[in-house]
Image: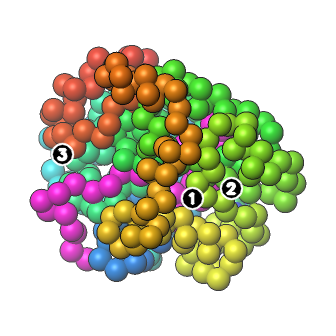
Amino acid sequence: MELLNTDDVGTVITVVGARGGIGKSTIATNLAAAMASSADRSVLVMDMDTGYGNVALMLNVKPHTTITEIAAYSDLTESTLRAGLQRNESGAFVLGAPDGPGPWARVTATQVQELIQFSARFFDYVVIDTSGIFTDIVAAAMGVADRVLVVNSLDMASTKQTSQMFELLEAERFDSERLYLVVNQVNTAITIRPEDVQGIVGQPVFWTIPYDQEVPASHSVGRPVILAQPKSSAAEQLLGLARRVTANEGDDQDDAAQTPGRLARIVPWPWRNRQAQSGETDSIVAQRPTRLSPREGRAASGESRFRGGR
Ligand SMILES: Nc1ncnc2c1ncn2[C@@H]1O[C@H](COP(=O)(O)OP(=O)(O)OP(=O)(O)O)[C@@H](O)[C@H]1O
Ligand SMILES: [Mg+2]
């Protein structure tokens, strides 16, 4: 398949969550597969789970080169990048994680941002899966994202942690218009409702995905549920999510009218106004997607405190 976007950059979608086991990888892989399955879209999914990333497993590919190796290249070329990718049956390209956390110790947040921005030159969409611990790598992947899907599961512990995550992002003056709260029901034991999540987190729920036993069943055969069981309830919602997050790319104007702008109008966070008035943007996560070259990106983001922790 020919890669698109030779003279433009793709959209970066980063999937995050305040804890493990809430469906981040499920959403990232299905989103990537759904977008790649639709016509004329090139999609790269990157596994930035700095623990034990399982994107490759979920998409049934075996990486011969890992993301930590690619990120370490100081003069990464398109051909080197492409040579490191695997391809899922959906057409999505995959850049898998190493076997465990060890190699991530040698990767900096700057390298991660450079890799994302470089990759976005060659793909219409770059989807990034992350770990459930808020590291500088997660912050880096958020900092250059056009859209950040914040995943929450329907239980009190997850919702409390999500609420704390939004408080952190507020303190760091992260641009709320890039945040999309997605509620995923990972088990049948529902303890709270999506409306409760909205009330506790103080952020409108952008999308919900129901519990569906077809999800773990699809993982066990290495197929995204949107391909394995496209008519299942989870698949239908995941396909809907893919349509919504790509809506204002020009293919669905009705949905586009309801995406980020509406989110921001429903909950006009006070800090967003403060930020607009003061013009402060000194955090890596507060930066708008820069669309800079890797070299420029390094210079622009080098002062963030989120970069210095590693
Ligand atoms: N909507 C759903 N219905 C049923 N099971 C689900 C659903 N979403 C995810 N699961 C299951 O929940 C488990 C965790 O999902 P997943 O690996 O996507 O979470 P994660 O947030 O990426 O976890 P980690 O932080 O450990 O990487 C998996 O077994 C998956 O099959
Ligand atoms: Mg995961």
Asked which colour scheme the image uses, the reply is rainbow
Ligand 1 within 8 Å of the CB at mark 1: yes
Report the residue marked by disc 1.
Answer: 27
Judge whether residue 266 can be spotted in this image: yes
| Residue 106: % across, % down | 37, 29
As displayed, is residue 217 above or below residue 308?
Answer: below
| Magenta stretch: includes residue 269 | no
Q: Earlier in the sequence, mark 2 or mark 3?
A: 3
> Within 10 Å of the Cα at label 1, are there few (<14), some (14-19), or many (20+) other Cα atoms?
many
Q: Is residue 77 above or below residue 214?
A: above
Q: Position of residue 211 (x, y in %)?
A: 76, 64
Q: Quadrant of the N terminus?
A: bottom left
Question: Could you tell which of marks 2 and 1 lies nearer the N-terminus?
Answer: 1
* Residue position marked by numbered label 2 in the rendering: 184
Amino acid type of the residue tagged 2 in the rendering = Asn
In the rendered structure, find residue 77 and report the number of the disc placed on it: none
Q: Where 191 falls versus 167 (above or below)?
A: below
